[in-house]
Each structure stands twice: as structure tokens, then as C-alpha cells.
Image (cartoon, rainbow, N blue to C red):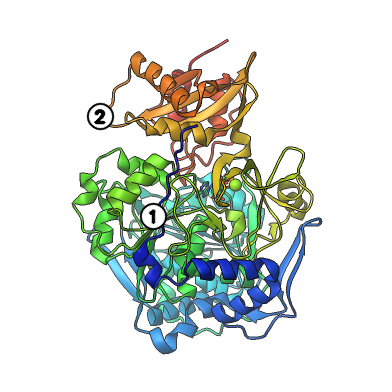
Amino acid sequence: MKDLLPRYPVHQQAVATTHLNNAQYNALYQQSIEDPDTFWATQAEQFIDWYEPWQEVSNIDFKTADVSWFKGAKLNASYNCIDRHLPTKANDIAMIFEGDEPTDDLSVTYQELHDHVCRFANLLKDRGVKKGDRVCIYMPMIPEVGYAMLACARIGAIHSIVFGGFSTESIKARVLDADCQVVITADEGVRGGKIIPLKANVDEAIKDCPNVHTVVMVERTGNEVEWFEGVDVAYTDVILNYPASCEPEVMDAEDPLFILYTSGSTGKPKGVLHTTGGYLLYAAMTHKYVFDYQDGEVFWCTADAGWITGHSYIFYGPLANGATTLVFEGVPTYPDASRFWQVCEKHGVNVFYTAPTAIRALMSLGDELVQNYDRSAIRLLGSVGEPINPEAWHWYYEIVGESRCPIVDTWWQTETGGILITSMPGSADMKPGSAGLPFFGVKPALLNREGEELTGKAKGALALTGSWPGQMRSVYGDHQRFFDTYFSQYSGYYFTGDGAKRDEDGYYCITGRIDDVLNVSGHRLGTAEIESALVLHPAVAEAAVVGYPHEIKGQGVYCFITLMNNAHESDELIDELKGFVAAELGKFAKPDYLQYAPGLPKTRSGKIMRRILRKIAENELSNLGDTSTLADPSVVEHLIDNRIIHE
Ligand code: ATP
Ligand code: MG
């Protein structure tokens, strides 16, 4: 196989100024593995303000799926994200809000954040919300989504954010699963110039949720909505009646902070439960070290609050560190596809963190859209959500980052609470396409099918040995499912569901979900590897590869490809691409079928739903499974109509 991974040395300039250099990373990593409890206790004292210390640092048993960190210690997450910064940062900007329209923005200082959050907390209390109650948040990306989260944290309520693009059915399922009795929403959302009827969706959803007694509605557009006296509360009208101070509830480190349902690219959503102390420490610490966050910088994570990335790296991590975090309401392509770079210029963004799906989409539209804006303030770029194929990596590095900004390709999951594998700036070389090295305290293992640990350079199922403070603690209301999903496959390990390769330097390259690994004529092949090869071709913007049963080879390779704007569909191109993959990866990997796909079925967070594509490739259309989290269901119809029917 051709080497797709040249090395990019640590940037010399970065080394001089980063929090950690290579020697420091190595020493700290070593300590974190050899004596985790001492390591984490030291970090916990440094990053978090505690009301009372813990009785034990950790208590971990992967055989029973029991994980606890800092049990007995007391803290409040909202206090840590706000109040403790006030003596020095009351007038510093906590949040920059950038609206859907480029003319719409707002800054919120730490003092203002404090006042908003306290008022909101008092409103919730007034509606009877207490410690341990679940509150559903279904909001656009406006500052109030942050106020709502922190208000819950302040009074010890458990928030469950449902992405504002999800449908009525998704809200209903999540409200019922967590038995939320309060829903916080807005009249309408605005994204990419389009209006989303949030309040109406909530009204519809809670018809079947008898326990919901309160719907708090923030005004966003001011358009008329249906009103239910006794249930609905007009936030905007009443909020100033509530006092701007509210004593934070004293929480145990192991008290739940939030529930977040995973995006569902692999099946029925799970209510991932995170607790307070370990999660907050891990979010804050990874935010500081992975993004090398320096005081005063503007940090922009483009995720939505409805994803774990939004929880950890728009709100909890940055705010715990007293950072300035940017909250963006819009989409990368509105009013035009230079929106990201226009916002970077406007607010002097220093650290920019986005997803490969956005990078690939923008890459296919040309470099000028980027180059028209000043990106000189950007110092570091990040990627999350999927493997970033080398082609997109290079574009991100050379065009967006002008070959001067390190890229952190961050591998993690809703379940892990924060980043687990990446190459930290200043302490590790970057290798395009490879996430990199483990974060402190993280011990990855590669397992073969027999569950044996592989050593050295290897390829296998990615599991983790031992815990880290940000680890999820349970599936809400179903601890057995927690055990079954993550600990039953390989005894004593947390199984991630992903496959990975480790190279001679100990770098991990994520090859995709294990379910997505193909076995072609006895060769095990990650779909991500074939996809990476396909997008190296100048005509291909995006590719999704799945297997289908093949009599001779075991599995055949079926590819869906989206072309670049300036490329044209033709049979010659199909042949060329087949040959191209064979040349890149080897003859055995040569695709059997290539189907043109103007759009691919994606979750709302931009991930390809390969399980649906698998059904199309297998011509098994009777049961496509849960499609309620698809961003655009019409894409699937098109693919079905144009599928290639084979023997
Ligand atoms: P579900 O678990 O419900 O199917 P999901 O796995 O897409 O949904 P997330 O927790 O948001 O939900 O995503 C985590 C997964 O995303 C990882 O397990 C991995 O497959 C992929 N991923 C995230 N970041 C990276 C990365 N930097 N490189 C490669 N893969 C990544
Ligand atoms: Mg997952």
C-alpha cells in the first residue's frame, strides 16, 4: 500500500509557546499510566474548585461496568464555569454569539453570563425543578442554550439536549426515555435563512408526554406561536423578574450532570449519562492541552449544542477555563460558502474546530472562498467526528491554515466525554489521516478477534484498558445496556466499536467502525481506507463504501461517490476510479460497483449512515431501520432509485 501518511514535524514556533513540549508530554503521560490516581488528583486540584475533597480518586470495575471518580468530593459545574472567574474576569467576554445573519451578533461577559444563568436557575426553581430532575433542552444555537445548560447545572437538574434539527418523534422518544418534566425551547429557530418551528414541534411531541408540566419558551423570531396557559412560560417576558443571584447547589462528583443521546448512526439512540466532577475535569483539561488554549484567545467549535462536541468544547471545557467561546447559530454555506472564514476574520478566531464533512464540502467549492478572508489570527485547527482523509487534511492545512497552523485530529465519542486520541501541538508530529497519540491516562489496546491484545505495529478492534475521568457512567435507566454495549465483547476492556491501526511510532489511525470493516477475499479492509483512496482522485468530493455478500470473495465493495462541482458523471470515470483504488490499495480492494450519489444519507451531525447504504447495496429495502435522525431523507430515495442491482 502506498504511504498516505508523510510526517509533519512539530511546528518549531508552536514548541516555543505551547503548554507542553514533547518531553513534558512523555513525562506526564508516563506518570498518568503508572500512577493514575496521583496524576488525576493533582489535575483535579489544578483545574476544578471543590467545596470538599474526595474520599477516593477512582473506583473502576470493567467486569461490572462500575466507574466512579472523585466520589464524595463536592462541586458545582456552573460555579466552576462562571463564579470562580468573576474576581478577575467579570468584564471579559465569555461568549461571542454570531447569528444566522452576518449582521447579528452579541457579546456576553462573565458577569452577564452569571446574571443570566442565575435568573434562569431561579425561573426553573419557581417551576418546581429540583436537584436530580431531568430537563429537556430543544433550542437553536443562541446564548440562551448555554444559559439553560448552566442553569440546570446550577440547581443540580440533569439536562438532556435534543438537537434543534430533530423531529417531533425524536423529541418525544427522548423526553419519555428520560422522563423529562420540563422542556426549554424557543419560538422558532433560524438556520441558513430557514425557519424551524421549534415550539410547534415541542407542542406536538409532548401531546404524548403526560409528565411534562412546563415548557419554557425563549423568544427568537417573535413570530406567533400557539400558547398553552398553565404549561407555557414566556422566558423573555418574565426573566427580568427573577433575581440575578442563585446559590449553586452542592453536588457530588458522581451526581449526574447530563444525559445525551448518541446520534444513532448505528441504531436506537442510547441515553449516555455523564456525571459532574470527572466530566468537567476532563473537558477542561483536554480543552486546555489539546487546543493549547491560551488565556484571552477566541475559541470556536462549530458543533451544535446538541452534540457532545458542543457540550464539551463550546460550553463546559472552554467556560471552565475562563475562555472566550464562540456560539454560532448558522451553517457553513449561508449566506454563502465563505461564512466560516468571514466569521473567523470578524471575531479574530484563534482556534477553529470543525468536522471533516464540513471541510470536504467546502473544499469542493474552491479555494477562493477561503482566501477572500483574513485568517491570520487562526493559530490552530481541529477536526472531529470522522476520520479526516489525507486529501481533506492537506486542504485544511495548506489552504485554510496557510501551512502554518498545526491540525489536531481528535478521536473521541459521546461516551468518552472528551478527546482521547490526538497529536497535541508542540508535543507530537502530525501525520495526515492519523489521529495520533493517547491523551493522559488513556491506554488504548488493539485486539484481534480472539480478544488478544496485539503489540507493536498492528491493526484491530480499538478498546481501552482502564478508565479516565470523562468516561460515561451508564446508559440512563439501563445499566445492563451499558455493560452489554461496551464491556461484554472483550472482558476487562471498554470496547469503542471502532477499528484502528497502530504504526511504529505508536500513532493510532482510526479505520472506521468495526461494523464497517469489510472482508474481501480474506483481506480485512476498513471502509475508511477505500473512501480515503477514492477522495484522493480530483473528481471525487466525498465517498461512502459498504460491503455486500459476494459468493466468491465473501464481501464485495460497493461505493457511493459524490463528485466535485466541476466533474461530470461518465462510465469512463467509473472505470478510472476502480483502477485508481486498485492502484492505491491493491487489486483486492478494487470496487465492484460505483454509484453516483449527488447526496449521501447523513445524520444531523454530518456522519454517513452506512447501515442504510449497506441495505441499498444489498438490495434489502424492506427494513431500512430507524431513519428519524437523517438530515435529509429524500437523499435515500434517490439512491434507491439509482441503485445497481447485482446478482
Ligand atoms: P452512535 O454511537 O449512536 O451510532 P456516533 O458514534 O456517530 O453515533 P458520536 O459519539 O458522536 O456518535 O461519534 C463517535 C464516533 O465518531 C467514533 O466512535 C468514531 O467512529 C467517529 N469519530 C469521531 N472522531 C473521529 C476522528 N477524529 N477520527 C475517526 N473517527 C472519529
Ligand atoms: Mg458511537
Extreme residue toward the bottom, this view: 87
Q: Is residue 503 left or right of residue 641?
A: right
Task: Name which residue lies at 43% across and 41% down.
Answer: 389
Extreme residue toward the right, this view: 63
Residue labelled with disc 2 = 566
Q: Secondary structure at mark 1?
A: loop
> Where residue 341 sits: x, y (%)?
27, 55
> Where residue 119 sits: x, y (%)?
46, 78
Checking the image for residue 159, the label placed there is none
**Residue in front for this viewpoint, 218 or 553:** 553
- Amino acid type, label 2: Asn
User: Which comes before the other along the chain, label 2 or label 1?
Assistant: 1
Density class for disc 1 (Cα within 10 Å; few <14, some 14-19, many ≥20) is many
Q: Secondary structure at mark 2?
A: loop
Q: Report the Cα–Cα distance between label 2 and label 1.
A: 37 Å
Residue labelled with disc 1 = 188
Above or below for 485 versus 9: above
- Amino acid type, label 1: Glu
